[in-house]
Image: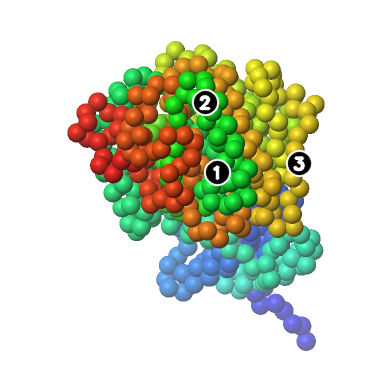
Amino acid sequence: MTIRNRTLSRPGFGARHLFAAVAAAFLLNALLVLGDFIETRWALLPAQISLELAALLALILVLPRWGIRIGGALQWILAAILLSLLLLRLADIVVPWSFGRNFNAAVDMKYLPFFIGLLHGSLDSATFISLVAGTLILLLAALVLLHWSIAVIARSGLALGLRAFAVVVLLAGFAYTLTPARYDLGALPIGSAVAETAWRNASYVWDAKGFSNRYLAQITAAQAALPRDADLTALRGRNVLLVFVESYGAITLTDPTLAAILNPVRSRFEESARAAGYHVYSSLLNSPITGGGSWMAHATMTAGVRIDTQPLYDVLLTTKAPTLGYFFRDRGYRTVVAMPRIQQPWPEGAFFSFDTVLNDAAFAYAGMRFSWVTIPDQFVLEKVHAREIAMADKPLFIQYVLSSSHLPFDSAPPVIEDGRTLGDGSIYDTLAFEEFPPPAQVFDNQRGYVATIRYVLDSISNYLVRRLTDDSLIIVVGDHQPPLTIAAATRNKAVPIHVLSRDPALLEPFRQAGYTAGMTPPATVTDVGMESFLSWFLASYTSRPESRSSDGR
């Protein structure tokens, strides 16, 4: 008796159709379980079974039973949808490596013209045209390939489709057993990365468009409270330097051990500043976060919205909310942000209205790196001075994001008396510096923390006294409490804020708001949030006193 495979003996179908269906399903599975190909070589090895592929196969096999023919038009539509999802997944892999954060379709799609313009400006015309043409050809080829895969599976029919999927499951299971243990693929060889990425970004867009009203209403309400007639004329065209000090929290005031070391540092800062003609006042602000997430504190203070979650920050970036940089730029200031820890482009600078973003590359630092692989803060202050302040032909608003006091607090560079001798930073390779190896519990490295805060305060003091000669308004503020166990236990989110200027009139609004003379804040807790600063600042430095806020901060 001869047993024949009824499926393969059908007219028009044969082994080559089964092979084609398996190849198509295998290709789709490989693309849908695409992993982090930048980190691992296992990107194209389908060591997982795609739940999205299972859903697609089910759709292809069920629709004909419902009388819906999967013809050419529907195949192209499915291919286009699949290509869009794969591009979304690709962005979700590439963006974290390129920008140090997750991909957010609601935010990042706005920056697509920015990147195209960046490429156009940095490449010659022939190269740019070739790149654009090559990209379009590649996308078209991908669309054709996906259409072929869907068409082959649809044409093969119910029996071959299931057999193709069964073979892919076996191959994926086999590849799963070969994958090195260091690549965690989960307890089961099943993947749904594309669906997860699509769902996450759909929620981002949903929130950004205000459909959920979870975040947009909060942003809109905060922005509505801003003075609409702010002109900043009370600043009289003086430079404004906003200096964020990493992890500078109220714990430096409340913990006896830390305060015993840092109070003399603050006193020395105050004494040298006064000797150089500065007036100084201090107070506290409540940060929206503690221990980390500095960018949310920066946004809170400069956008006037309490940003205490990443989704809220992401939604903020999709709005047209005016920020502190916007108001300064509107009054004719040049706006600059110094972010030495950023090693990628930072397109978010456009939202915050910065004319120039000084990232790691902009500093051309050639010396050794310190805590958290950072450029020393004194070097940052000096280079921004040489590049911007010394060369300025218009008023400046400069926002500094200092980072020498970042976790793990394992090293503190020395303060160089004359910052002009720092050169390209290679001098640090020859200098002795303090090291503080983190204990087993890194969040208990109090010795390293207090040493790095001391370094930062001494660096700022040195710069203001020895290098800055004008009547700038300087605002020095912590971003959040440090990631230390003793700080977390206090449940206190307060951070010190110090304001200085050689022109006492510039500090009068702060004095009237309850800031106390000197470097010591009047209390150790406060109910005044960072989000109140923008509205108060705009109202206090306008020429129309009737628009000033009554809460003082």
Q: Which mark is residue 282?
A: none
Q: Nearer the viewer, residue 346 or 377?
A: 377
Q: Nearer the viewer, residue 129 or 154?
A: 129
Q: Residue at x 69, y 71 (%)?
A: 187
Q: Which residue is mark 3?
A: 435
Q: Residue at x 55, y 22 (%)?
A: 465
C-alpha separation, residue under disc 2 versus residue under disc 3: 28 Å
Quarter of the image where the N terminus is located? bottom right
- Measuring from the top left, give residue 95's x and y in whole percent: 57, 44
Quarter of the image where the C terminus is located? top left
Could one spot residue 294 in this view of the protein?
Answer: no
- Measuring from the top left, give residue 299's x and y in whole percent: 44, 42
Disc 1 on helix, strand or loop?
loop
Disc 3 on helix, strand or loop?
strand
Q: Is residue 336 above or below residue 251?
A: above
C-alpha separation, residue under disc 2 versus residue under disc 1: 19 Å
Q: Earlier in the sequence, mark 2 or mark 1?
A: 1
Q: Earlier in the sequence, mark 1 or mark 3?
A: 1
Which numbered disc, 2 or 1, marks the residue closer to the eye? 2
Q: Which residue is mark 2?
A: 273
Q: Residue at x 76, y 34 (%)?
A: 433
Q: Earlier in the sequence, mark 2 or mark 3?
A: 2
Q: Residue at x 61, y 54 (%)?
A: 484
Q: Nearer the viewer, residue 263 or 482?
A: 263
Q: How many other residues sit within 10 Å of disc 2, few (<14), some (14-19) or many (≥20)?
A: many
- Measuring from the top left, give residue 536's x and y in whole percent: 32, 38
Q: How many other residues sit within 10 Å of disc 1, few (<14), some (14-19) or many (≥20)?
A: many
C-alpha separation, residue under disc 1 versus residue under disc 3: 19 Å
Residue lying furthest bottom:
1
